[in-house]
Image (spheres, grey):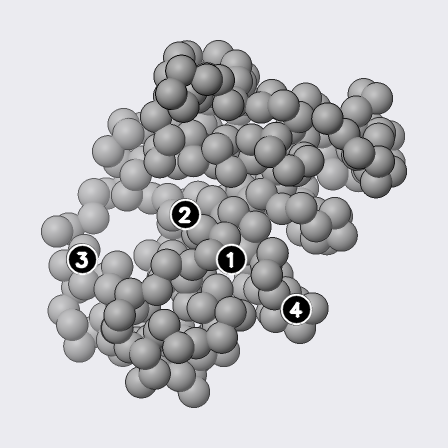
Amino acid sequence: MVEPVLPTSILPLVMRGVVAKVRGVRIVGPVDLTIDAGGFTVVIGPNGSGKTTLLRLMHGLQRVSAGEAFWNVSDDVARQHQAYVFQTPIMMRRYVVDSIAYPLILRGMARRAAHKQAADWAVRFGLGHALDRPAPVLSGGEKQKLALARALIRRPEVLFLDEPSANLDGSATREIEAILQDAQADGTRIVMATHDMGQARRLANDVVFMVGGLVHETAPVAEFFDAPKTRKARAFVNGDIVE
């Protein structure tokens, strides 16, 4: 399959009154939010606030129960120019090089060319030593690197990430953050959920703060952490329990 030519940016992504329900129970929304081109957005909030569901709504993994979410292009075109990395990466029963090459082969690239490109990306992501290892036997940090390489090798315009370093140690987290900063510098728009406030400060240009399934506050990162506007945001920044 040949990847469709992108006539313009797929952004902005506009959400108007978006609601997600599961078995009739509202879990997120209504949400009014716009993701513009450029930058690194971090979605934060207490456990159960709806961060993952919001990302899934944006990417199309979660059905919109009410309201509307639309891109600057058709949904079919937008889908070809974005990627999503889960908190626990999904590993195919393939070698590392095959796993990274897979998205390229799906889009019609010859296997040999895809494998060559995948090997280059594996080296770039610190996986050059593991090309011929089965993906499921990698360490947690290596699996996350593989998932990022597999997502970014297509050079998506938008990358969604759900807690990509939640289960990693400091060294692996530093490596993942460097990869994400490089991806943003290369032009990928990143939207990431995280529980790590230090990570949010280090990476974000802007913050979306969620409580109870609602977007409670949005602001540039320095403004949010230095002068949050709402009581719940101030409590969250101070490390207090927010319900």
Q: Are marks 3 and 4 in contact (CB under 8 Å)?
A: no
Q: CA distance from mark 3 to mark 2?
A: 16 Å
Q: Earlier in the sequence, mark 2 or mark 4?
A: 2
Task: Read off the residue under disc 1.
Answer: 183
Indicate the amino acid at tag 4. Asp
Q: Is residue 39 above or below residue 1?
A: above
Q: Earlier in the sequence, mark 3 or mark 2?
A: 2
Query: In the shown orientation, is residue 145 left or right of residue 201?
Result: left
* Front: mark 2 or 1: 2
Q: CA distance from mark 3 to mark 4?
A: 33 Å
Indicate the amino acid at tag 2. Tyr
Task: Read off the residue under disc 3.
Answer: 106
Task: Read off the residue under disc 4.
Answer: 169
* Mark carried by residue 201: none
* Mark carried by residue 84: 2
Look at 84% across and 21% down and name the residue there.
231
Q: Which x, y percent locates residue 173?
A: 63, 65
Q: Earlier in the sequence, mark 3 or mark 1?
A: 3
Q: Which x, y percent locates residue 37?
A: 51, 36
Could you tell me which quadrant the C terminus lies in?
Answer: top right
